[in-house]
Amino acid sequence: MVMVTKAPSRPSPTARRAARRAARPLLACGLTAVSLAAVAPGAAAGAAAGDDKSGGTTLTVAVSQSIDSLSPFLAQKLTSTSIQRLAYEYLTNYDVKDARPVPGLATAWTSSADKLTWTYTIRDDSRWSDGRQATAEDAAWTFTRMMTDPDAATANGSFTANFARVTAPDPRTLVIRLKKPQATMTALDVPIVPKHVWEKVGDFSKFNNDQRFPIVGNGPFVITDFKVDQYIKLKPNRTFWRGAPKFDELVFKYYKDGDAAVAALQKGEVSFVPNLTPAQAAALSTQKDIRVNDAPGRRFYALATNPGARAQDGGTFGNGHKALLDPEVRRALFLAVDRTTLVDKVFQGHAVEGEGYIPPRFTSYFWKPGGTQRRAYDPAAAARVLDAAGYRKNADGRRTGKDGRPLDFRILCHATDPNDKAVGKYLQEWWGELGIGLKVECLDSVSDPWVKGDYDLAFDGWSVNPDPDYVLSIHTCGALPRTPKDSGATDNFICDKEFDGLYARQSAEYDTAERADLVKRMQSRLYDTGYMNVMAYPNALEAYRTDRIASITTMPEAAGNLWGQDGYWSWWSAVPAASASGSAGSGGVSGAVLGTGIALVVGVPAAVILLRLRRRASADDRE
């Protein structure tokens, strides 16, 4: 499930079941090129960068996703976890060039001959933002708390489930004893927290870490202020061991509407906007002081099928359609999705057709089905599969199940994502020809029905780390909630013994080639079950103002993106432009002509032009 808006500052146990979902790209259907209203020359002049009133430099990032929690033990959405990586150090980080493990809080690490004991050397130049030294004891306490308190393992428990014991024999030495070998020991994506602050917390399921600012951390930034669905502000950690960030403030500002975020970029109210539509990217690429980044993405876009919401204790819940428990029905739905059309029409070519779970950007783990395993678009074959399985059309042309119940499904759609809406229309058309009904339920927040199991299908997507363990773990039986009333880390309640067996093997495999093969076999199994239908790997379309940001590092450095958990390097490395302090500059152009010959019109609101053109282009695209 994609990380979508969930506003409460104190997430309930039910809401915390939502797994770490990737930010939704706002991709519109059928827009080959569209004009954005130009900002008149000088219109933004005098506005401080990011609304900074002090004359210092502020880097403001537009985000479309709510913060689910500021607690490192509860945060699961992409925006939240990206901010956690800025506020806290992890034992290791990913190299900006090739994603190999590099020092974080740990400067070195070794494993015993039996691969069961890992010893980390903790750096002596990391300090918490309240002035206290960060030590191995902080790391040992963080991991031990996750091992002993299920509420502290909500977000990242898969990393410590195999830990037998964690100790800190001295301030510079951390020792982790494993139950069995674990391949992720140099890729533990777990924020280390200050023991002297967090040992005072009672109930980890309720503590949201938002009562007192600034929040004590040891990352490159310090969280200084937060307003739900408005903003989160960070200041540089001047004692950060890698060196303090160059901007005087980093602000993540919430915009529910993607067009509003783009307009804010044009006017100089924000410095960076991620998740652009192809039309927005094309329009912005012609404008002064704005640079568009179009890079291979690190996420996938998929259909998730409800396999029957359940808990580890055997308890079931939710109201998913029973017909979707039949693998033949899922197979037929697979065969009736035209990925080529979606890439061409919805993503406007800024994506790659999807099949495997891991995007092609991660070459070692990328997998594609071949031969007879591949389920290419074949609506006639889909109809034959349904007929053979006993789901035949009635006199009205509607497919019915063996119980006589029509095959009418619901799909959860993110109301703020035109991509979901566009794909939903295609699915209604394609599946309608099979005699299957589809109701597209677009909500501001899909989290509540999703975690309750009250859905049939849902648009899903995840941002994948260089090490794929986490996104694989969310489909294991161990990620299910313990009881129907508990929280879990599951994505959509998949529990498959064969998948679990492969997961256990890859997590213990230290040979990189052998592990990669196991990961590919896991993707093959996930593909065959039909619970996840990966339709595309969207490009990362994002833009920033060059009169605010003189230089910034992508991840990877060559042809990489800026937004996401990899944004650690982006925001830490960003250098302010000379004009970023005190004045926003002109912020726009007086007129231009784009690919379809539509002129930019000065003085006409961008939302009006976009709305009119989107309605027309969407209608034309359906013909």
Image (cartoon, helix red, strand yellow):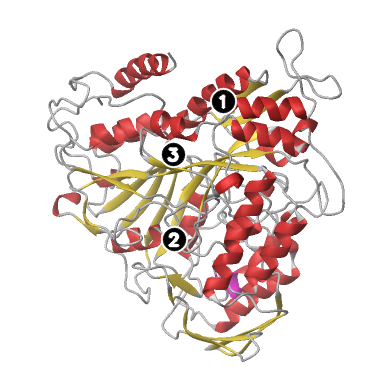
Is residue 618 shown left or right of residue 281? right
Quadrant assignment for the N terminus: top right
Is residue 16 shown left or right of residue 276? right
Q: Are marks 2 and 1 in contact (CB under 8 Å)?
A: no
Marks 2 and 1 sit apart, C-alpha to C-alpha, by: 30 Å
- Neighbours of disc 3 within 10 Å: few (<14), some (14-19), many (20+): many
Residue on which disc 3 sits: 25
Instruction: Report helix, strand or loop for mark 3.
Output: loop
**Between residues 226 and 268, which one lies in front from this camera angle?**
268
**Between residues 132 and 330, which one lies in front from this camera angle?**
330
Q: Nearer the viewer, mark 3 or mark 2?
A: 2
Q: Position of residue 554 (x, y in %)?
A: 32, 58
- The residue positioned 77% from the left and 36% from the top of the image is 326
Compared to residue 337, the image places residue 105 above or below, namely below
Q: What range is drawn magenta here?
A: 192-197
- The residue positioned 33% from the left and 63% from the top of the image is 572
- The residue positioned 37% from the left and 50% from the top of the image is 296
Given the image, on which type of amino acid does mark 1 rest?
Leu
Q: Position of residue 69 (x, y in %)?
A: 58, 51
Numbered circle sitting on residue 355? none
68 part of magenta stretch: no
Given the image, on which type of amino acid does mark 3 rest?
Pro
- Neighbours of disc 1 within 10 Å: few (<14), some (14-19), many (20+): many
Q: Nearer the viewer, mark 1 or mark 3?
A: 1
* Residue 332 image-quadrant placement: top right
| Outermost front residue | 371
Numbered circle sitting on residue 427? 1
Instruction: Report helix, strand or loop for mark 2.
Output: loop
Residue on which disc 2 sits: 363
